[in-house]
Amino acid sequence: MRRVFLGSSGLAVSCLAMGTQTFGWGVDETVAWAMADRFLEAGGNFFDTSSTYNSGTSESILGSWAKSRNRRHDIVLATKVFFPTGEGPNDFGLSRKHILRSVEESLLRLKTDYIDLYQAHCFDMSTPLEETLHVFEHLVRSGKVRYIGVSNFTASQLTRAIMLERMRGWSPLVSLQAEYSLLVRSTEWELLPTCRDEGLTLLAWSPLAGGWLSGKYSKGAAPASDSRVGRGDRWDDQPEQRESELAWRVIDCLQQIGRDRGKTSSQVALNYLLSRRACLVPIFGARTLAQLDENLGCVDWDLDEKDAAILEATSRIPLPYPYCFIERYTRRREA
C-alpha cells in the first residue's frame, strides 16, 4: 500500500485509513485486533477513531491493541473531540475546558502519551474559533499532540481557521475530515478545492456512502437484516444515501464496471476516490475480516479513464447557484 504525506507535513500515512467506529459496536475486541493486524500487514498505518465512538470503547480497544503489539512508533493514531462525553454543560463542544479534559481521557484510553492527529470533530458555533485553535496549539507545544486537523467544517470556517493560525504563528492544520463519496459529491464544490489550494489532505469519511456503494443493496429487494438499512441504523445518512434514482444508477454502474474488471462494487468505489482525487485519503470501516479484505482490494490498480468518466457522469449532481452560474460562463469563455 502506497504512502502519502499528510497535508504539507512530513507525516507519512497509508493511502487508506482504517476507521474504527465499529470497534465495540458489532465488532468485539478479538475481531477488532485481528482486523487491525490485517490492516498493518497490508501496509496500512493510519487508524482513525473518536472520543465518543461507542462511549470511548473504540479508543480503548485500539489503544490496547497498539500497546500489545509494541509498535506505537509505526502507526499513526488519529482521534477527535467535540461530541458529548457526559451529561454536564461543559461535556460538549470545543471549549478549552472540554478539550483539555477530553484529550487526557483519550490519552488514557489509547494507552499512549501522545496523539498523532487530533481533530475538531465538528465546527462549534458556541465557542470562538480562536479559543479552540489556541488550546490546540498548547497541546502541540506540550507534546501531547503532534498534528491537528478539523472535521465537518464549511469552506469559510476552514479558511478562517487557516488564516487565524497564520496570523498567530500557530501550528498549521494538516487535514480536513469530510464526508465524500460517489453519492455525496457536494464536497467537491468548495471543500476539496480549498484543501488542494491550502495544502491540506481531505480525509474522506463514509466513502461507501453508509454501505450503499458496497453492492449489498438491490432495487426492489429487501435489505439484509444485518445491514445498516435493514437495522434501520441510518441516523447520519444524507438525502443522497437513500433509495433514489441517482443511488440506483450509481450502484448499477459500479456493479457493471466491477463485473468487467473482476472487482467488487466497494473496490471500484474506493479506487475511484484513490485514483481520481489528489490530496485525499478515504477512511473505510468494516465489521468482519471478509469486509476488511474486500476493501483492501481497492489498492494497487487504477480505473481506466473511460470507466472513471462514466462514474463521474453517472454520479454528477446539478450544481446550485452560484456554482452553476460560474461554471456556465467559465465554459463559454474557454470555448
Image (cartoon, rainbow, N blue to C red):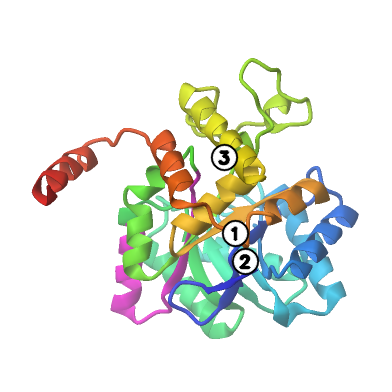
**Residue 257: mark:** 3
Which of pointers 1 and 3 lies earlier in the amino acid sequence? 3
Q: CA distance from mark 2 to mark 3?
A: 33 Å
Q: Which residues are magenta?
A: 157-181
Dot 2, crowdedness within 10 Å: few (<14), some or many (≥20)? many
Residue at point 63% right, 54% down? 298
Confirm whether the magenta stretch covers residue 163.
yes
Residue at point 71% right, 79% down? 74
The residue carrying mark 2 is 78
Callout 2–callout 3 Cβ contact below 8 Å: no
Confirm whether the magenta stretch covers residue 64.
no
The residue carrying mark 1 is 301
> Which image quadrant: the N terminus?
bottom right
Q: CA distance from mark 1 to mark 3?
A: 14 Å
Dot 3, crowdedness within 10 Å: few (<14), some or many (≥20)? many
Residue furthest left in the image: 333
Judging depth in this view, the residue of 45 and 315 nearest the camera is 315
Does the rendering let one see residue 93?
no
Residue at point 80% right, 48% down? 290
Callout 1–callout 3 Cβ contact below 8 Å: no
Q: Callout 2, which amino acid?
A: Ala
Quadrant assignment, res 12 = bottom right
Q: In the image, residue 129 lies at what x, y percent? A: 38, 62
Q: In the image, residue 205 lies at what x, y percent? A: 56, 50
Q: In the image, residue 182 lies at what x, y percent? A: 49, 41
Q: Callout 3, which amino acid?
A: Ile
Judging depth in this view, the residue of 37 and 70 nearest the camera is 37
Query: In terms of secondary structure, where does tag 2 sit?
Result: strand
192 horizontally vs 272: left or right: left
Q: Is residue 233 above or below residue 272?
A: above
Q: CA distance from mark 2 to mark 1?
A: 27 Å
Q: Is residue 200 above or below residue 243?
A: below
